[in-house]
């Protein structure tokens, strides 16, 4: 039995992930710290703005609706055993929360979608702190790391990266990577939600097989690797996404093996 703590946010996708993980028979979730999503996220910025009919807004609201379609029935009808505590955004680095986590003394801490973690927790739980980054490092880093591959017509770079957390942004040592199962007829949000579902169950595998995980040689960095921030999210990028999505999806599916060979990922043998 692994004793864990989850650090996450409080949107529906985060609730789904913490609920799924906490139900596993091999995992004892001591506590989940859920940060408020009322500030600091793109969707909150859009809701507080005036141009709610912009393409940027409509894309995020559509994403929010498809998350309800994917996850809400599950989260509304399954027992939540995550022992959740709701805190303000960035409060995760407060002395109070840090001391609570140290006192609970988990075997592992896992994080998904929370604020950047600062020094004390990283130092105390070095090697026992796993973060999941939605995107394939090092190819895409920063913000929107599965959004921008779709905008750029590079579906081979969509995925999730599990890594040992460090003080950088998406720079920790990679543990394992997964790709979504992409099919004809998908929308951008369907691809993302299917990936989040697979990500939750992959996290369970990683937690339960933590001692079997092997150290992996990092993927080679390239001048073609991309880094985006929230400021890059623009009206024009959404227009490009939906204007080219079906064509790019067909090109990817018609040339899938060739496309995936361009973007090798790290699969941990300890999970086989």
Image: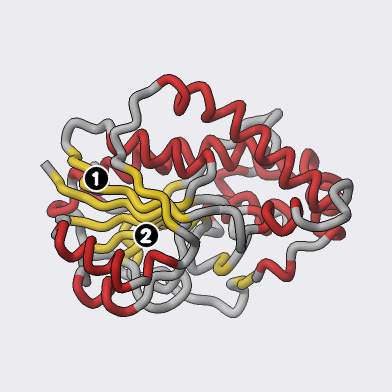
Q: In the rendered view, would you say 25 is above or below 226?
A: above
215 or 107, nearer to the observer: 107
Q: Looking at the picture, does residue 265 appear above or below residue 73?
A: below
Q: Which quadrant of the rendered structure holds the C terminus? A: top left
In which quadrant of the rendered view does residue 26 lie?
top left
How would you rate the neighbour count of disc 1 (Cα within 10 Å): few for under 14, some for 14-19, many for 20 or more? some
Label 1, label 2: how many angstroms apart (C-alpha)? 17 Å
Which color scheme did the rendering employ for the protein? secondary structure
Q: Give percent across and percent down for residue 209.
A: 18, 46
Tell me if residue 177 can be seen: no
Q: Position of residue 216 (x, y in %)?
A: 28, 65
* Residue at image point 60% right, 39% down: 191
Q: Are marks 1 and 2 in contact (CB under 8 Å)?
A: no
Left or right: 101 with respect to 264?
left
Could you say which quadrant of the image residue 266 lies in? bottom left
Which mark is drawn over residue 216? none
The disc placed on residue 271 is: 1
- Give percent across and percent down for residue 70: 56, 28
Q: Nearer the viewer, residue 55 or 11?
A: 11
Residue occupied by mark 2? 131
Q: Residue at x 72, y 47 (%)?
A: 60
The image position of residue 247, as x and y in percent, is 80, 42
Is label 1 or label 2 in front? 2
Among the two numbered marks 1 and 2 on one chain, the one whose residue lies closer to the N terminus:
2
Q: Determine the secondary structure under disc 1.
A: helix
Q: Which residue is located at x 42 percent, y 73 percent?
A: 171
- Residue 65 versus residue 252 in the image, above or below: above
């Amino acid at each position: 039995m692994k004793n864990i703590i989850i650090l996450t946010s409080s949107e529906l996708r985060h609730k789904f992930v913490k609920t799924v993980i906490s139900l596993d028979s091999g995992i004892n979730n001591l506590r989940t710290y859920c940060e408020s999503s009322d500030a600091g996220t793109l969707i909150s910025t859009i809701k507080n703005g005036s141009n709610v009919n912009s393409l940027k807004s409509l894309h995020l609201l559509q994403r929010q609706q498809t998350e309800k379609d994917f996850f809400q029935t599950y989260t509304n009808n399954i027992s939540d055993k995550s022992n959740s505590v709701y805190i303000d955004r960035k409060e995760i680095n407060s002395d109070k929360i840090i001391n609570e986590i140290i006192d609970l003394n988990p075997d592992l801490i896992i994080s998904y979608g929370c604020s950047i973690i600062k020094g004390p927790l990283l130092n105390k739980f070095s090697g026992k702190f796993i973060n999941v980054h939605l995107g394939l490092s090092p190819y895409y880093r920063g913000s929107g790391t599965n959004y921008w591959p779709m905008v750029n017509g590079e579906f081979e770079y969509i995925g999730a990266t599990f890594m040992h957390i460090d003080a950088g942004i998406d720079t920790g040592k990679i543990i394992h990577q997964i790709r979504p199962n992409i099919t004809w007829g998908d929308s951008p949000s369907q691809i993302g939600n299917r990936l989040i579902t697979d990500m939750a169950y992959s996290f369970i595998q990683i937690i339960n097989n933590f001692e079997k995980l092997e150290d992996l040689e990092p993927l080679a960095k390239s001048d073609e690797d991309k880094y985006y921030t929230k400021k890059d999210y623009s009206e024009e990028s959404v227009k490009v996404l939906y204007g080219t999505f079906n064509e790019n999806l067909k090109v990817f599916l018609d040339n899938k093996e060739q496309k995936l060979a361009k973007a090798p990922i790290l699969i941990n043998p300890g999970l086989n």
